[in-house]
Amino acid sequence: MVLSRTRSVLVVVCLMVCLLVCNTVQAAPPSTAQSPFGEVIEVNVVNVDVHVTDRDGRPVPGLKSEDFEVYEDGKRVKVTNFEAIKVETETAAVPKASAAPAPAAPEPAKAEVAPEDRLHLVVYVDNLNLDPAHRTRVLEQVRTFVKDLRPEDRVMLVTNDLGLKVRLPFTADPAALEATLDAVERLPAAGASAESDRREAMRQVLEIREAVRKIEGPCSRSIMVPAESYAETMRNQVLQSLKSMTVLVNSLSGVPGRKALLYVSDGLPATPGEEVFQLLAEICSGGNANGIQDVHDPDLEGPIDQFKGSEALMKAMRFSVVEDLNRLAAHANANRVTLYTLQAAGLQSSSSSMADYGPNERVLQLPNLQFVQKTNLENSLTLLASETGGKAILNANDVSPDLRRMKEDLSSYYSLGYVPEHTGDAKEHRIEVKIRKPGLQVRSRRSYRDKPAIERVVDRTLAAVYHGFEDNPLEVTLKLGEQVAQGDRFQVPIKLRIPLFKLAILPQQDKIYRGSLRLLVSTRDEQGGVSPIRQIQVPLEIPEQQILYAMGQFYEYDLILVLPPGEQHVAITVRDEATAATSILSRTLTVGGEPAR
């Protein structure tokens, strides 16, 4: 994408309008003018959503601000904002039979719900780490869950199929949700092949052991090859899934309201290949506990330098993705996205999971191996949920009760806010919430990143280009001009018009009235590729002698985007640097074809 400034029309504004703008600057909380341009310091309130439950896991109502203690980086902070949130959800009542039902009274019109009061829920189906049969069972229950959300809430459906794919943007349309869930159930899923690859790696370990035991020893160094190869492949697959989820969390950063992500998979191994290395630890321990011949066999013809079982778990840690999981959790916290993780595999008996192993592979049925495999898949899901204030749904074929509890989470909680001593330091800070009443459990996000102001503006621009969110307090209008072919691309002119009375244009000592705008532009193509966000600083200068002639005028700015043909989503942000007032516009247009919509 190429931006060029073709024309900047500077118009004047009268003194009366300027005074009105100046008053607006002084009164705009929570900012304070600092410079000749009205530079502001934005007060950053850190909000923490807190869930409190009793010993039986039931929500605890009626708590007050004084019942909580909040700590940032180990230091107690003062709670300045407190609210007990209880969202009323509507459930369809079953009509009773009646011979002559009374005529229904007309329902009063409902007020439009502000975006910041909505829940934005993403259902993320990780087909790369999911068995299709498990997916079918779980999505049937997810269907009921999303139907029970409030009409004003929004749901988005996303899949991971060797890359992130938005199957359905945020919507409240039940028919669209139903149809898209049906389509997702028919997509290929790689979970079954992943299980096959795991077993094949274990079989190769045993085959190498038997093939070389009299020449190189039962635990020759060559026995590590299939374990390391499998672990490396799985690690790359897990990192790809985490990368896709990070991109998704990025796109949600500027979305208003409460944000939650329901991650559906059979689990992500926190240490890819750990169960295969556990097998090496079992068969290379040097003893006979499992019918395995000692590595110091007197008939050994080859060298004595053998792989020791004690090395196996140290080798496994080279493939750990725990740091990557922690980074994702911190990233979600920075963007106020709560992660709920749902393990679709559910409860599986050990007999069914090992049914197709042969009689010579009894070592593969050792409880230690099954335990390591199970916990390895669960630990990542638990970490992501607990660090972000969500919950992990594990070991359940019927997940409906857990989804109902998740719904309670999303509709009933306590919102605590505090003002940190730092402002936009771009650092990660740990958060701990304590409850003064004994016997109660507290759950909340455990960290946040104090983003600089410009980074928060970038977040909102991304939300516009990904999801179409708009906010226009500056009353900016946008007009698209005629497209012009330029090689294999097109020039797309865009004219911005901004009422000057909405901007802070302040008098200076040199008898010049000055202001400053920042423009941010980003585009997204049909394949989901997003351009880097381009920023443009636009200074405004009006001589004092012209100030009386500009009442009711506009500032106009022309952009030219150079874009490839096809559908393009364009987001444009206009920020008044003096007041921090920010307008965000989103448009979808067909380049080289039909006009924009």
Image: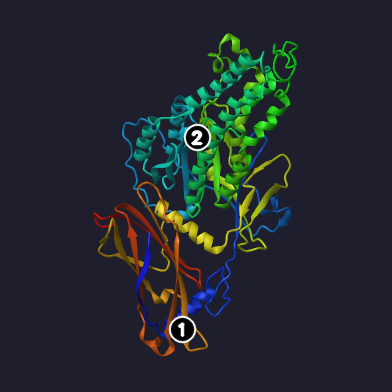
Residue 25 appears in the picture as rendered:
yes
Q: Residue at x 52, y 63 (%)?
A: 454
- Residue nearest the viewer, comparing 41 with 537: 537
CA gap between label 2 and label 1 equals 56 Å
In the image, residue 213 sits, relative to residue 482, either above or below, namely above
Label drawn at residue 562: none
State left or right for residue 384 relative to residue 252.
right
10 Å crowding of disc 2: few (<14), some (14-19), many (20+): many
* Residue located at (65% from left, 17% from top): 366
Question: Given the current orientation, which residue lies at the most extreme top position?
Answer: 359
Q: Position of residue 206 (x, y in %)?
A: 61, 17
Closest to the observer, 471 or 161: 161
The picture places residue 162, in percent across and down from the top left corner, at: 45, 37
Specify whether residue 60 is in view: no
Instruction: Please state which amino acid type lies under the numbered disc 2.
Output: Val
Query: On the rendered structure, is 454 left or right of 153?
Result: right
Secondary structure at numbered mark 1: strand
Q: Which residue is mark 1?
A: 513
Label 2, secondary structure: give it.
strand
* Whole-percent x, y for residue 240 in the image: 51, 39
Circle 1: is it few (<14), some (14-19), or many (20+) Cα within 10 Å?
many
Instruction: Please state if 284 lies on the left or on the right of 18 as rendered.
Output: right
**Residue identified by numbered label 2:** 264
Quarter of the figure with residue 54: top right
**Residue 431 position (above or below residue 102):** below
